[in-house]
Amino acid sequence: MEQAQEVIVPCPPDIPVVILCGGMGTRLREASEKLPKPLVDIGGKPILWHIMKTYGHYGFRRFILCLGYKSDSIKSYFLNYREQVADFTLHLTDDHQPNFHNTAGNEDWEVTFAETGLLTGTGARLARVSDYLSGPRFMVTYGDGVGTIDIGSVLADHKRAGRIGTVTGVRPSSRYGELATDGDHVKRFAEKPPTSGWVSGGYFVFEREFIDKYLDDDPALLLERHPLQQLARDGQLTLHPHEGFWMGMDTFRDWTDLNQLWDAGTAPWHVWAD
């Protein structure tokens, strides 16, 4: 009798995390004119670093960066990562190699840098890194949003539902105070109330089938349009509801707000140990 083949279910260290890092960040021009958006800093560290530290906190260590705009800057940041934070002595003779004195800057990360095109849509960027997606499952997020996302719970919901994809739904706050009125009498004033419905906060999980059935290499292909819309129509997209903090860094005001939270020591997404 033929023995049944064992199905290996990947755990976080084995699951690739794709981060979409290729956009130009045109609405954040004040902070990103000289840098790609994922390198715009919160508290002196790129928002991309904050996102990777969040995933790392939940055990994920394999990252694939979909690069485009100013990709050389992102590569340079990581190529010089340890030198930026560690103590070292440099002998300006021979090979000029630094002698490091501590482990600052060491991360248990494997990072793949993939050139996916300057003006490529998010769906096509994902399709273009398919060769790096070993295994049956992978994660995807954007390089500009942070939150108190329990990524372990996102993965658990995905496994429980048994569908092809899972998206984290968030309720970002409105920029304007909401007024509840009775005639000319204001009954309630809510500063920055949350939106009533769910919006996509990224932090996706997909089965490999998503790449093969829903994506192609058309440079105009956006993940958020036909691929995800069709996945939802096919009944294959699960919602992971997140009621806690989430913020996308889309504007200069967002950047200012996130830095104020970090500088005050009240950044809710700071879940990792320093």
Image (tube, grey):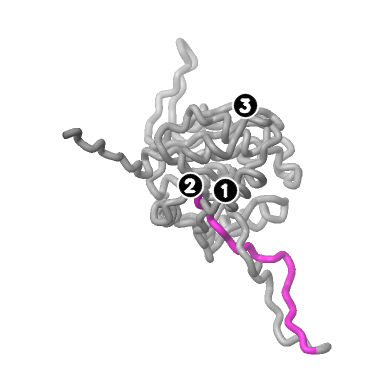
Q: Which residues are magenta?
A: 165-182
Q: Nearer the viewer, residue 230 or 197?
A: 230
SS at badge 3? helix
Residue 48 belongs to the span the image colors magenta: no
Category of crowding for the residue at label 2, using alpha-carbon neighbours closer than 10 angstroms: few (below 14), some (14–19), many (at least 20): many
Q: Residue at x 58, y 52 (%)?
A: 232
Residue that carries the numbered disc 1 in the rendered image: 231
Category of crowding for the residue at label 3, using alpha-carbon neighbours closer than 10 angstroms: few (below 14), some (14–19), many (at least 20): few
Camera-near label (2 vs 3) is 2
Residue that carries the numbered disc 2 in the rendered image: 164
Camera-near label (3 vs 1) is 1
Q: What is the spatial separation of the Cα atoms under label 1 and label 2, in whole angstroms?
A: 8 Å
Q: Are marks 1 and 2 in contact (CB under 8 Å)?
A: yes
Question: Residue 214 sits in which quadrant?
Answer: top right
Residue 91 as seen in the image, left or right of residue 47: left
Residue 126 as seen in the image, left or right of residue 29: left
If you read the primary sequence from the N terminus, does the residue marked by circle 1 or circle 2 appear first?
Answer: 2
Q: Amino acid at mark 3?
A: Asp
Residue that carries the numbered disc 3 in the rendered image: 72
Q: Amino acid at mark 2?
A: Ile
Q: What is the spatial separation of the Cα atoms under label 3 and label 1, in whole angstroms?
A: 34 Å
Q: Nearer the viewer, residue 172 or 217?
A: 217
Residue 177 belongs to the span the image colors magenta: yes
